[in-house]
Amino acid sequence: MATLTYTAAAAASPKLSLRNPLSFISSKSLSFPSSKPSISLLKPLNSTKFPTLSPLKCSPNPSPSPSTSSLKSRLRNGETLYGIFLLSFSPTLAEIAALSGYDFVVIDMEHGPGGIHESLQILRTLSPTNTPAIIRLPEFSAAWAKKALDLGPQGIMFPMIDSPKDAKKAVSYCRFPPDGIRGSAHTVVRASNYGINEGYLSNYMEDLLIMCQVETVDAVKKVEEIAAVDGVDCVQMGPLDLSASLGYLWDPGHKNVREMLRTAERGVLKSDPGDGGAFLAGFAMPHDPPVELGRRGYHMVSGAVDFALFRNAALADVKSFKNSVTVGSDDDGEEDKDGDEKYWSE
């Protein structure tokens, strides 16, 4: 077996031959020992001494302080945050949303086609952009909460919370015993950096945003009590389901729906987030744009859905093309004045 020895003299020589890249190696540096190997293959492997390496140990701060840029911290600092709902579970669209400057992305397992595995891919996509993610559960249950929280989102949204009892259960699903009933695998899941973050159990609730959705008439009647439940950070209005609860599924802009929504909003705004109360969060609608929600005291506004953005852009693109090739069309160049208003008042 030939061995190649790199000598100090060779290292001192800066001259290299372009024709022979190994010209810096002296011929004397090449040695060909006897055919006997330096380690006998006949000896047991454990008879050969190898250097012992000490295992690497990550030693993070055992009790790191909560992030100053987390959603919860920003809300406490008085900011109004603007986000988008992601129903497509497309990593590309999630990345575009993050790079566009949305304050948060809601990964919607309730109405989107994806589950836990797809949510994990979105979280990994958002991570390099430092854009916080909120996971909306497909149903109000401890099992779904556990699986979602183990992924490590900054927020979790519980659908269909109708009473303070439901809200207390939701909070308990997020807390480990003895404060709650969340199942624990904190030594290996993504939320704790797979166990590398040794301080996870000390601070896991500091940045976690717990959101409860108020979507029915019964929930509106109890909204003040829901907002006052310890651990509930945000009460999220659900205008579409609320309109259905009132019998106006096709008309969420109806006067009766608006009045019920205002009642719910006032109930949440009576609470003080600095003293155990909750922030107000909600969806913008065609008849109720994001700026109006901000004026009414919402601190978290979701103003877009990825499917809807693409749908609207695609419809406009097709219409623009067809109008441009239609000669003598009566409505050529005219805008569709009905649009969403027609849909919301069928």
Image (tube, rainbow, N blue to C red):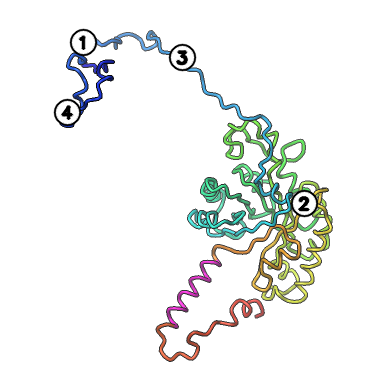
What secondary structure is found at the residue carrying circle 4? loop
N-term mark: 4 or 3: 4
The residue type indicated by label 3 comes to Thr
Q: Name the residue under label 3.
A: 52
Question: Which of pointers 2 and 1 indicates the residue nearer the eye?
Answer: 1
Callout 4–callout 2 Cβ contact below 8 Å = no
Q: What is the spatial separation of the Cα atoms under label 1 and label 3, in whole angstroms?
A: 28 Å
In this rendering, would 303 be left or right of 49?
Answer: right
Q: Name the residue under label 2.
A: 167
- Residue 128 image position (x, y, % from top left): 52, 45
The residue type indicated by label 2 comes to Ala
Q: Name the residue under label 1.
A: 33
Callout 4–callout 3 Cβ contact below 8 Å = no
Question: Which of pointers 4 and 1 indicates the residue nearer the eye?
Answer: 4
Q: Does the magenta stretch include residue 24?
A: no
Q: What is the spatial separation of the Cα atoms under label 2 and label 1, in whole angstroms?
A: 77 Å
What secondary structure is found at the residue carrying circle 1? loop
Q: Residue 60 — which label?
A: none
- Residue 103 image position (x, y, % from top left): 62, 54
In this rendering, would 48 be left or right of 136?
Answer: left
The residue type indicated by label 4 comes to Asn
Can you tell which quarter of the image residue 6 is in? Answer: top left
Q: What is the spatial separation of the Cα atoms under label 2 and label 3, in whole angstroms?
A: 54 Å
Q: Residue 20 — which label?
A: 4
The residue type indicated by label 1 comes to Pro
The quadrant of the picture occupied by the N terminus is: top left
Q: Residue at x 67, y 34 (%)?
A: 64
Q: Residue at x 21, y 27 (%)?
A: 16
